[in-house]
Amino acid sequence: MKIPDSPAQIMETLPSVKTDRLPLFLLPALALVALPLIGSFSTWVTLTFAGLAMGMIIFIIASGLTLVFGLMDVMNFGHGVFITLGAFIAVSVLGRMAGFTESPSLVRNLIAVVPAMLAAMVAAGALGLVFERIIIRPVYGQPLKQIMITMGGMIVAVELIKVIWGAQAIPLPLPEAFKGSLLFGETAIEKYRLIAVVVGLVIFAMLFWILSRTKVGLLIRAGVHDREMVESLGYRIGRLFIGVFVAGSALAGLGGVMWGLYQQSVTPEMGGAINVLLFIVIIIGGMGSIGGCFLGALMVGLVNNYAGFLAPKVALISNILLMVIVLLWRPQGIYPAGKA
Amino acid sequence: MSEPLLKLEGVHTHIGAYHILHGVDLEVMPGEMTVLLGRNGAGKTTTLRTIMGLWKATAGTITFRGEAIQALDTPDIAHRGLAYVPENMGIFADLTVCENMLLAARNARHIDQMDAKRLDWLFGLFPALKTFWQHPAGLLSGGQKQMLAVARAIIEPRPLLLIDEPSKGLAPSIIQNLISAFRELKQTETTILLVEQNFNFARQLGDRVAVMDDGRVVHAGSMADLVGDEGLQQKLLGLSLASHS
């Protein structure tokens, strides 16, 4: 047999296989179904964009949670605290840089917002490390205890946040250049929602690249499937898990900043309030699956906004209904991460 | 006589409240294939998992190249040069064949950094791997998965290969392919500890044999001696070659 010059050449000569693309049509189908119900095209575009922006922020927050569950079967019901901490860190940083956020210059706004996001990610990541070491490590493999202790951990952490920042809601105004809308004919798209969509896409592209193109990503995907075999190949899954947990916490911190700016105020309970949405997203997506999480988050964002406009009373249960429908179709979620 | 590559002395293993291994003594000589035979529940798989550190030995010593490894974590044991193919093959179904192989090549961060000559040798041993290189491993047949599992274990040279029931559930023609592949592998002087229930498969490959029962090794010797002694086969395994040929 001829020795190949490079293994990459072998890959190029072989046919690729079909991937499951059916779930990719869910989003356009959902949007198209909503169009005649909403009636006005411009309102539909505005709602669709609002839904996508919301979905992107939820994806940023939920991506770490789904990987943490996929890798170690850890049910972290305390994930919301990283969101809250990130948002409050942003309040402190942006509050001290009011001169930059009140300027109409986008560059000056970014000089304030980018450090606020980085500080939020560092703080949430550090809290994530403490959370994993002190709260989660002792209860590996004990799901019921995980639920109870992570919820307890979040309650304690939220109370500590109240001690530092107070129990009241604090305004988190958008920087000047982020305010207002862009008009496309009769359609108005809020600038901040556009930013949220761009940031969400960048995060998704980065995660997708890491998971599909790097050895670390390969290890994470393999670990989600069979962590014992990964260890047998000579890799320390525990260290990988800590890395994923910290990165996931940092992303939740970033999501907290974006969610706070989206709501334009922060409260100590904001993380807990969004927790239910996060679990709906990762269940819909298939626990442990980043692609599924991305699709699930966007669907939740769209359904939330469409239902809020069409039938506000139904909006509260719309995402539960969405989850029921998806699970009736695919009981393991849209893109289940196959466990060994 | 050379020193054993792997040596188990009085190894006990508990899984929860259950006492599975009751003082296993076993020697694996370098360059040879040692076959671990025994009925279901005799402790063969537990022995392999204990060697790999997936279940901890509660007593006794396991030495590899003279170093005690029973207290080491599984990744450290793997780094000592032990490769493991579990009974369920441990294939990452969502990853492609290529990605499964890349993962096992610890020294390669990218496909281009894998040893092309060794890869080509593996393609010679297991041609299906090349055909399905870009396919998700979960789509492979049982035999192809087994070939991938073995190829993955030897993508980089490893001094000792632990393989758990590779012939289980495979069609006879696939088993013949595996036998051919193992024969070629033996020529590279790779040391193999093979767990099997299929005596016909095992006798064609093994240099030495150890028979387990109730968590102990009840017989150890050369495969040729066992193959040539139907009485011993009947006594240890409850069978004769005539019923397997």
Image (spheres, helix red, strand yellow):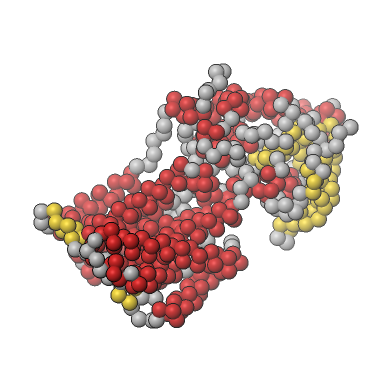
Residue at image location 59% in from the left, 25% down from the top: B117
Q: In which quarter of the image is residue A100?
A: bottom left
The image position of residue B106, as x and y in percent, is 60, 40
Q: In which quarter of the image is the N terminus of chain B?
A: top right
- Along the viewing direction, whichever of A285 and A218 lies nearer the viewer: A218
- Looking at the rendered structure, the number of numbered marks drawn on it comes to 0
- Along the viewing direction, whichever of B181 and A155 lies nearer the viewer: A155
Residue at image location 85% in from the left, 37% down from the top: B3
- Along the viewing direction, whichever of A109 and B112 lies nearer the viewer: A109
Taking A322 as reference, is A230 above or below it?
Answer: above
The image position of residue B93, as x and y in percent, is 51, 42
Taking the view exactly as shown, the residue that stands out farthest to the left is: A185
* Left or right of B162 on screen, residue A105: left
The reply to whether residue A51 is in sight is no
The reply to whether residue A8 is in sight is yes
The image position of residue A161, as x and y in percent, is 44, 76
* Left or right of A266 on screen, residue B195: right
Taking A270 as reference, is A64 above or below it?
Answer: above
Residue at image location 67% in from the left, 41% down from the top: B84
